[in-house]
Image (tube, rainbow, N blue to C red):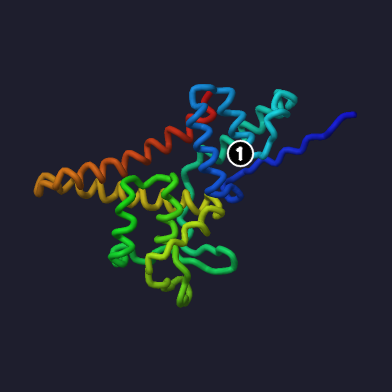
């Protein structure tokens, strides 16, 4: 008896949660030196393909799936979504980072790297808070209280997480460039220089990781 195998191939990050992405990230790190295992892991986590069926997939189908995944996993042009909905509640991204509450700033600063890792949900729960008032494109969000709300963000799609990450990293790059341009006039403390450089370098690291997934 021939059994049909249905494979749902995503075309963007929308349906892939932070929880699933972190699991994918962990497995990719474990098998990063095994090209065949890396591809199998991508198909397992992103398409829900049971690995026991991997060898039964026709070569042409396998190539089509791999190419489809490569199209969006290599894409870096993901915009920030300022307004999102979680469990029927509308959340807004911090509307004015320069006026962020001191407590929020301190809590974000304790994470030394701006990257999607085990701490990322905590950062997102600080940056996104329930909306209090909204008028047109203008809105205000709840005052930061320090209450841990990170669990809600583990099931949010990676399109939202990547949009926030790229926004922050681009902001860091702009700050880095403007700071370096003015550094001849005023010497900066070493810790500030290293922090800015590390934040900027994460962009290239992420680009290299995404592009390298399917390069082989």
Residue most toward the right? 1
| Left or right for 205, reference 179 | right
Identify whether 114 is placed above or below 84.
above
Taking the spot 33% from the left edge, 58% from the top edge, the residue there is: 107
Secondary structure state at the residue bearing disc 1: helix
| Left or right for 14, reference 119 | right
Identify whether 25 is placed above or below 55.
below
Taking the spot 48% from the left edge, 59% from the top edge, the residue there is: 81
The picture places residue 214, in percent across and down from the top left corner, at 54, 29
Taking the spot 55% from the left edge, 52% from the top edge, the residue there is: 157
Q: Which residue is label 1 attached to? A: 45
| Left or right for 212, reference 176 | right
In-front residue for pair 100/184: 100
Q: Quadrant of residue 9?
A: top right
Quadrant of image for the N terminus: top right
Identify whether 82 is placed above or below 190.
below
Taking the spot 48% from the left edge, 35% from the top edge, the residue there is: 210
């Amino acid at each position: 008896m021939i059994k049909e195998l249905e494979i749902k191939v995503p075309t963007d990050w929308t349906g892939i949660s932070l929880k699933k992405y972190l699991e994918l990230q962990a497995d990719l790190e474990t098998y990063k030196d095994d090209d065949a295992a890396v591809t199998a892991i991508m198909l397992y986590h992103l398409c829900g393909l049971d690995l026991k069926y991997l060898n039964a997939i026709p070569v042409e189908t396998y190539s089509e799936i791999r190419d489809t995944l490569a199209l969006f996993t290599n894409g870096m042009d993901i915009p920030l979504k300022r307004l999102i909905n979680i469990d029927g509640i509308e959340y807004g991204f911090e509307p004015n980072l320069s006026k962020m509450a001191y407590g929020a700033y301190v809590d974000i600063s304790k994470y030394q790297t701006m990257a999607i890792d085990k701490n990322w949900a905590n950062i997102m729960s600080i940056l996104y808070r329930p909306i209090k008032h909204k008028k047109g494109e203008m809105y205000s969000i709840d005052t930061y209280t320090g209450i841990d709300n990170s669990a809600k963000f583990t099931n949010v799609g990676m399109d939202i997480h990547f949009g926030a990450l790229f926004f922050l990293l681009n902001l860091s790059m702009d700050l880095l460039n403007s700071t370096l341009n003015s550094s001849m006039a005023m010497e900066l403390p070493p810790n500030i220089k290293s922090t800015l450089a590390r934040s900027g370098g994460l962009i290239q690291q992420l680009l290299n990781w995404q592009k390298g997934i399917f390069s082989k």
